Every structure is written in C-alpha cells, then in structure tokens.
Amino acid sequence: MIRKSELTKDFYKPKEAGALIGRGPRTVSSLVRAGKLEAIRSDINRILIPRDSGAKLLEQSGLLLEDEDARRDAIYARASSHEQKNRGDLERQVLDIMNACEKEGLDKPVIIRDTGSGLNTKRKGLVRLIEMAKNHEIKRIFITSKDRLTRFGYEYLEELFAMAGVELTTLQEEENKDLQEELVDDMISLLASFSGKLYRIRGNKKKKMREIIDSVPEEDRE
C-alpha cells in the first residue's frame, strides 16, 4: 500500500509507474495506448505519467492509501506601493477575506503579503504562492479581487493553480476607486517602459549609423 503523499514526483516513467503496482512498464504503456491511463509525451516522445494518474493507477489496483489532506488555505494580499502598505491596505484585504470566510472557516491559513506593481511577475509573494501550489502545500487561495494577483494574464495563473489542484477564490469582481487609480499608475509605468525601450532602440540605430558614416573615408563621402 502506498500513501498519496509518497508520490513526490510530478511525472513518472512507465517503469516507475509499473513498479508502484508491482507490474512492468509494458503494462503501463498498454493502459496508456488503450486510453485507460492519462499520460503525456516528453520532448523526445517518451511516455510520462502525471502524479494524479499514478494515484489513480494505485487506486484502481487497490493499493492507494488516502492521506488526510494536509494542505492549507492561503490568503494573498498585495499593495502596489509602500504608501498603500503604510495606509493599511494589506491588512484590510486580509481582514476582508477572513470576515468573508468566517462561516465556512479557513484551514490553517498562511497569509502572504506582497508589495509591488501588478505588472511585476517576479514579486516575492507571488513566486512563493506558485511554489507552494507546485509543492502541494496549499489547496485554496483567497484574494479580494483578480487584480491583486496580477494585472494581466489572470486566466493563465488560474489554469496553473487548477493544474496543481488549487482552487482560486475571488471576493469581488469590480475594482474600487483606489484600484482604478492604481491601474492608471500601472498603465503609466507600462507606457514609460515602452517609451524607454523605444528611445534606446532609436539611440542604438543612430549610434550604428554614425559608426558606419565614420568608417567611410572622407574622400568617399561625397
């Protein structure tokens, strides 16, 4: 018997998956070809069995021991600037979520507070949240609104968390006035970033043109 928590790899080779149930790799490959076992193909076209499929294989063989779900809930709060943080925006978000979930309760919630633009995908808190999901440490994520998690590409993160078996819960869909003002700031930052890149590109072109002109002898420039 094998506990689900003992399946620590994201993907298993047919030989490894077969060993879980005391069978050979051919048995696993046959199940995949018959459509009875979900699998993916690697870059070199090799069969890989996802962790969840490995668990189903064990369950079908009567060899799976279900663990008590040790995963926790997560509360994620983000402030765009230290000014917002100092105004208590982070704590208000946390409090709003805890009040909204008072009836159903939160399971040993881990609270992640982040400070930075919603355009920044490398925020420490966001990176930590993704790592916790990948490591099967959390089961639900609570945010006050979608833009707290990210300004763009929310659907991709939602799908990423779903693939890790993590439910993403949003308290409200509409932005309040403060969030609308923050969006304006983010758009200004985005435009400034593009403008800076455009000026650098133009500057590089002028520099290269000057180098070409300078490389031509003066008597040949006429």
Image (tube, helix red, strand yellow):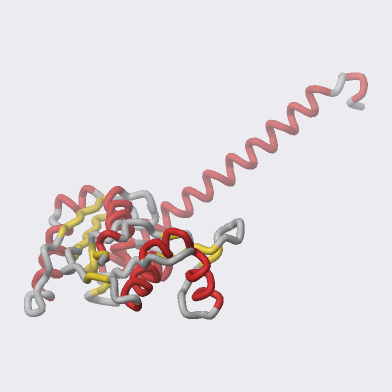
Percent x, y of residue 216: 85, 23
Above or below for 196 versus 162 = above
214 vs 96, nearest the viewer:
96
| Residue 137 seen anywhere in this rendered image of the structure | yes
Question: At x 87% / y 19%, what residue is drawn?
Answer: 217
Can you say which quadrant of the picture contains the N terminus? bottom left
Percent x, y of residue 179: 28, 65
- Classify residue 134 as left or right of residue 193: left
Question: At x 52% / y 44%, what residue is drawn?
Answer: 196
The total of numbered circles placed on residues is 0
Quarter location, residue 119: bottom left
Question: At x 33% / y 53%, what residue is drawn?
Answer: 117
Percent x, y of residue 122: 37, 49
Above or below for 32 versus 196 = below
Above or below for 93 versus 215 = below
- Classify residue 43 as left or right of residue 192: right
Can you say which quadrant of the picture contains the C terminus? top right
- Classify residue 7 as left or right of residue 199: left
26 vs 121, nearest the viewer:
26
- Classify residue 215 as left or right of residue 93: right
142 vs 194, nearest the viewer:
142
Percent x, y of residue 159: 40, 70
Question: At x 42% / y 59%, what residue is drawn?
Answer: 16
| Residue 143 seen anywhere in this rendered image of the structure | no
164 vs 154, nearest the viewer:
164
Above or below for 201 versus 52 = above
